[in-house]
Amino acid sequence: MTTRLAGPLALTMLLASCALLPTASTLPEDTTTTSPTIGNGATPSNPTPTTAPSTEPVTGAIVVTDQALTIIYDDGPAATLTGDIDYALKSAFVDLIGGLVFQYADPGPGVSPGILRLLPGTIEPFELIAQNDGESLTLVDVALVDGRPNVIYLIRGSGQEVGGQLVAADLQGGAPAVLYDGPDLISGDAEDSLIVVELRVNATCNKLVAFIDGDATWEADCVDGSGPASVAVMDGLVATVVSGQLEVTDVEAGETTTYPVVGAEHVFDVSNGVALVLDDSGALITASDSGQTTLATMDGVRSASLFDSPLAVTEGHRLGGIRAAPGPCSAAGQPSVAPPLEALPEAVAAIRSEIVERAVDCDFDGLAALTSPSFTVNFGGGDPRRVWMASEARFGDDLSLIVRILNLPFAVSVLPDGRTVYVWPSAATDAPTDDDWEALRPVFNEEEIDAMRQQGGYTGHRIGIAEDGEWLFSVAGD
């Protein structure tokens, strides 16, 4: 049982059956897609789990806030998985076989804009469905299709707000299937034989249409400014929030019930007659026609979903991107004041000392603030703060290396623009001497030094500060 947050005039819908689709008379004829695929019919090449996945179903809710995903169990303590430090999570769902499928909202460097999957028993996620250039990819749900877990997503052109394709792709391999394709599509979802779509009628009117076994059997009134704030579909039910009230419609029976939730803002999920709702106080509530229970009160809830399936993901697993290190950085514990070096101009000596101090303090923001506008952190470009944090997370040595390099002898060079630059280490010159190579021993071992000498020059990390104190680069390579 899963769903997602849909904002004002947007619909969350749950898709669960490719075999039972709207008929050709109700859908556009062209249902081909050039969208990202999981595979061409073969089982995806997934990372090998490090532990055996759980096979015992558990119940609870998944709640997504900006940089964290919280798993609230019905009968146990909650678990929190941390996302990227700079980019907000968008939505997440149990993959129905122990893991998670999720997506970031508007990510930048280091985070995939596509759909990610964290397999049970693994630590890091992998990109399940890539977002092509010129397209916008939105995760809608994970649902059973013919008894097999499928990821459901919406494909649109970049900047496109209406239209596109609603697609289901088997998590166990196979070509994606287009469930709905049309210029009037706002969003869509389905469960078993029920498919519900939100369609644009005109600039002020959207409508909900339900298909059962491919036939249009139910239609809701137009959604305008006072219409549903969100919609969820599951178990043959369509739940909507209208003017602060939660209404649940049994589509096949054509009956609507108002649930007693005061100040409802969003409905995220509905299953077995129970809805997951956020009210105007920030409380996350499970509600039925007979009452309600507060599940949690959280700030900045982006999406939430119920689950009653195996789940082998808990704290210690990661959601990808770049995360703050769980403990001190690699430079922690090193001397916070760089020993003075002779013949350094005052401005160079001052910035060198400040770089060391902020690195030892593990102050990524402060360190990045010392860089010049044209600062080079790697030859492919990038935000120095995120590059350092990624290196610390993966290798655990970048800030320590900066401190150690700055305590080696330096060389003086002249840039093409005529400025003088002080470069660490002194071996990072066109013609390093034996003394320059020997000076590297506090940082590099004998094999590493010999390998660089055989290559014809220093290829390790180097740091450059202009004579006016401008920090120009901290980069590895020639």
Image (cartoon, rainbow, N blue to C red):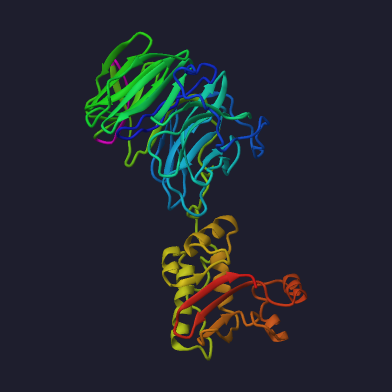
Closer to us: 380 or 320: 380
Q: Which residue is farthest top?
A: 253
Q: Position of residue 400 (x, y in %)?
A: 56, 68
Residue 163 part of the magenta segment: no
Q: Is residue 477 left or right of residue 452?
A: left
Q: Which residue is farthest right?
A: 454
Count of numbered marks: 0
Q: Is residue 399 left or right of residue 236?
A: right
The quadrant the N terminus occupies is top left
Q: Is residue 343 visible?
A: yes
Q: Position of residue 64 (x, y in %)?
A: 41, 38
**Magenta residues, dominant SS class:** strand
Q: Is residue 268 visible?
A: no
Extent of the magenta region = 281-290
Residue 288 part of the magenta segment: yes
Q: Position of residue 42 (x, y in %)?
A: 68, 31
Closer to us: 256 or 409: 256
